[in-house]
Amino acid sequence: MKYSYHWLKELSGTKKSADALAKLLMTHAFEVEGIEKCSLVPASVIVGKVVKLERHKNADTLRVARVECGKKDTRTIVCGAPNIALEQKVAVAMPGTVLPGGVEIKEATIRGVVSKGMICSAKELGLGDDHSGILVLPEHTPVGALFGKYFGLDDSLIEVKILPDRGSDALSYQGLAREIAALDGHAPHFVKVIPKIAKVPSYNRCPKIKVTYKNGCRRYMGMLFSDISVGESPLWLKIKLLLSGLRPINSVVDVTNYLMLLTGQPMHAFDADTLHGGVTVRPAKKKEKLMLLNGVTYILSPDDMVIADEKRALALAGIMGGSTSSVTEKTKNVFLEIAHFHGPTIRRTRTRHALLTDASYRFERNLDPHRVKEVAREAALLMTTINAGKMMGMRDVYPKEQKEWKITLSLQRIEDVLGEKVPLFEAVQYLALLGLGVKKVSGKNALDVTVPTRRPDLMDEWDLIEEIGRMRGYEKIKACPPFLPLVAGEENQSKRFERFLKETLVASGFDEVMTYSFYGEKEYSLARLPKERHCELENPMSPEQRFLRLSLLPGLLRKTRDNLRYFDALDCFEYESVFSRGAKKGSIEEKKKLSLVTVLPKKNKEQSPFFVLKGKIQSLRALLDISDISFVLPEEQSEKSAIQDMLHPTRRALLVIEGDVVGMIGELHPFVAQGFGLDSRVAVAELDYEKLFAHRLKEAFYVPLQKFPYALRDLSLTFPASFRKRVTVAIVEKFLLDVGAPLLRRVELFDIYEHDDEKSMAFHLSFGAADRTIMSEEMDRAFDAIVMEAKERFEARLRL
Amino acid sequence: MLQKRIIDIETEAKQALTIIKTLPQLEEWEVTYLGRKSALNEILKNLKNLTTEEKRIVGPLGNAVKQRLFQSLATAREAFMEQSIDWDAQAIDVTAPGVFCRDGHLHPITRLTYEIEDIFSSLGFSLADGPEVESEWYNFDALNVPADHPARDMQDTFWLASSESKQKTRNKKQERYLLRTQTSAVQVRYMETHKPPFRIIIPGRIFRNEATDVSHEHTFHQFECLMVDEPGKVSVATFKYIAETFFSSFFGKKVNVRLRPSFFPFTEPSFEFDISCVLCGASGCPVCKQSGWLEIGGAGMVHQKVFEAAGYKRGQYQGFAWGFGLTRLAMMKYKITDIRLLMSGDLRFIRQF
């Protein structure tokens, strides 16, 4: 909220400059978001006095005035206003003045008379809508004074951020002034001038008030004023509203707005002649319609609270008045409402109907029910003076009075929380300055603190300690190391593994990329991901970010395409959470995934992206101490991976560790690649982090080194067409080790190719024993056995 | 006598060495002067026949000369080897590019996270973690931000569609899911399974429903620090100390912390905290807008209601919690001017780190 410095100064009695005040608030109370200088009226508008007035010779409607604007400055001004009169004090815009509306005043000859300036109306000065005549200033206004300065229109606006805890008291001039005075070390000035209680006539004509929405309305006060004159507000009031950013409307509405700014208490004025019978605060009826002041008709529900008469709803309680009962220039009698509405109830309604108003903003911060009466006094005073109304009656429905409450504050607690001793007298002083009642508990090192109802944020010892801490100044607290037993932090193994994983990937050439956690329909359909497993946002930024990602790959593929504008090849990864609907309704599974993308350079035609990425994963496995990963065709596993359909149907494999599927690798399905604007050089993999972590080797054990040399021999097998599809490297390797046992220790594929429908594989075989050097005859026997068995099982023949 | 003889041998040998032109000549020289049958060797072999006094002089001298001659031989041999190779023919252009070996890069946020984790680990803090899709309870209610409270407006929240919500909850209402708006959401989760004393840090990704521009992102990273113990052991003064220690270590220079009053529903007292500007040393510069201070984050003493939500007894424990934007710190540290670069996935950006 932006506060006028002048007004704050007047209410608090501070002597500090605006800048010093801002600094004081920043250090001890609230964040100040800025100070701006503000001049509502230019400095070249001067207070003048009409000393001579004549008819204009050439125009019936115009008059020629001599206006005294200073000791040596009496000038001629042509004026058309009907209300101009001798001896009047007026606002004169000197030639060269640019008025708030943008009009520049120039010396001009009007029908033969030279006019040196202009006598302004309220509208021309931006001080209201009145353009029926010139603005007439109070008699005692000094001639020659700068208009803006004299009337307090040159001001500094201090923007203070009032957070929700203090919304109940500090969203008002009185509240902030009280705070400033406390920080200055004295009582605020405004409490010294409390208006007398308005006299309620014995005939009390105020409509009867009934509250049936008991949870929503704690207190409801109504006052009836008759014979009101609705017109322009006095200058001082308009100025206060304008400086606070509110437009003057009419003298009744202006009074309610002024009091809301001053006290923080919103109120509402009804045209009493539109009311039928008594006033009820009740839940709205189902589908009840109500047209509000903004001209919009709202359809309400019983959760909403309305102010109603015997016939219909009149206003949406605490939020906005209705159009039919509003105060206009024609209004004669006014029913004024000052109430306490329940914050959450107001908040729910204003959220439901998207109606954030100055009133609802304050009510939802739970105002002080006690304050209602204080405000009523001020209101009665202003309604009877400014609006010349007559007080016809008042009613106050307040079934359960809010009492002050007590908190016992131990001095030890203050020291425990702040880390420093605060002397008793200091603590007492700070609390007392804030207007709290403080008494020492006899025989104990504690204080009994009584909290007034305007501070609902002070509920326990810690709340009071905050008040003491900030009043005293947090800069006084000295940093102090803790005295603690020396214990090592609990090690987070998973986080450590995650870091090792990322650092290892980076060392092997991968760049880490971060992308958004959501995408749109386009991504999941392009990536052929199942729609039904996606979780959806209620309020996405845009439809393109409506679904929580099921896989990291769509995001990574988009970024890959972008990056390929600048790079020919790349390896990148993302490690983040993915989300999916769980099996149980309403359950959401969140998992960390590691996704990898490899793009081969355009000129690299001989390598297959699948094998390049596979090789990287295999070396990663070794670095990470993960037991052997096997690459299994998805057809051989019952478990289906979410990204399965994204991959090339005959160039994809599940990653399996000890029978557990940990992820999937493959080249992109050509349709997917095309959809993302990529070509065939891309291979991707997505791994489940938790599973990788679970399969990491926790301990390493030494295996004795081979003492006796291995005997080496190469084997090249050709499989006929009938076996071509069935025989994979994995199958043959397993076959070799089974048949060659125990002497065959290692096999290593060094060549694989297909020709004339046949398939050939060539291996380096290592034979050996742990306890001796084997003889060549032994190796020959083992080798022959392998060849025999290969012929038997796969109809394979030995290539020489 | 023998002394002179030894010195003469050395002089003669060195003389002979200067006129040697080929490697075979050098080998011949070695046999002559250092071989088994060389004069010097003969002298050393016969040491045992000398008197103790002579031994004491001749022995060290003979050995020293022998060492020196070996040294000269090595130098001479190296010179011959050197001459025998045509170095120019083997020359390469060392400024030509090296064999390509792709280097990878961590994301700056990750890099920064690790740096911060290391500092806190050295102070005995552990790492904790929590989900990004969080229940309304842990993100708000348990942190003393009840439904229908204006404090909910302090953070714009992404809610999951109501069809995704859990049916039953502790307050018998439908519990909604959201994308966590703060790493503080992990606080109560952690406290439910741990008993004080503890000190933890929680780095992580968080979400705010805000339009993006140069300085706003709906997805960014935060860092939470939580230290809880019995009353009297962890105070505002402790927080100040830990914060100053951390930032001084992070920036490699003495950093002061300034606390200003603020409000967070889950702490009481609550602070905004600033650090002395690390660029100008608090004397005022454009980065700190001439104030000498940089706004870093929020902090406070954990609200007793948060402890109660975790099942602790009111007043039994006390601690501080603080959080700051990792993203903001990264931008400050690496002088990144557009926040959107962080989530852009642009490798031209990533490869700078």
Image: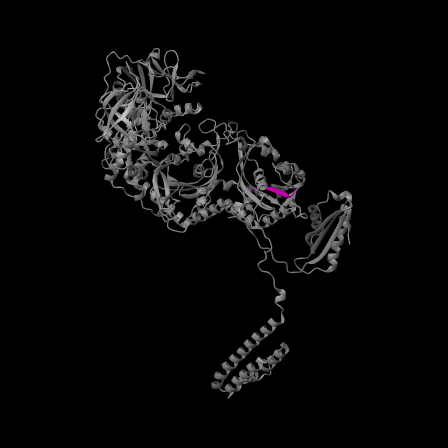
Q: Residue at x 55, y 77 (%)?
A: B72
What secondary structure is the stretch in magenta mostly built from? strand
Judge from the rendering whether residue A60 lies leftward or rightward of residue A597; answer left or right: left
Can you say which quadrant of the picture contains the N terminus of chain A?
top left
Q: Indicate yes or no whether the magenta region holds residue A678.
A: no
Q: Indicate yes or no whether the magenta region holds residue A681.
A: yes
Judge from the rendering whether residue B331 lies leftward or rightward of residue A567; answer left or right: left
Do we see residue B86 in this rendering? yes
Judge from the rendering whether residue B21 lies leftward or rightward of residue A468; answer left or right: right
In magenta, the rendered stretch is A680-688
Residue closer to the observer: A6 or A265? A6
Judge from the rendering whether residue B91 lies leftward or rightward of residue A539; answer left or right: right
Is residue A419 shown above or below A712?
above
Can you say which quadrant of the picture contains the C terminus of chain A?
bottom right
Location of residue B254 in the rendering, given as x and y in whole percent from the top left corner: 37, 50
Do we see residue A459 in this rendering? no
Location of residue B133 in the rendering, given as x and y in whole percent from the top left corner: 50, 35
Residue closer to the observer: B42 or A521? A521
Residue closer to the observer: A284 or A8? A8
Is residue A758 shown above or below A710?
above
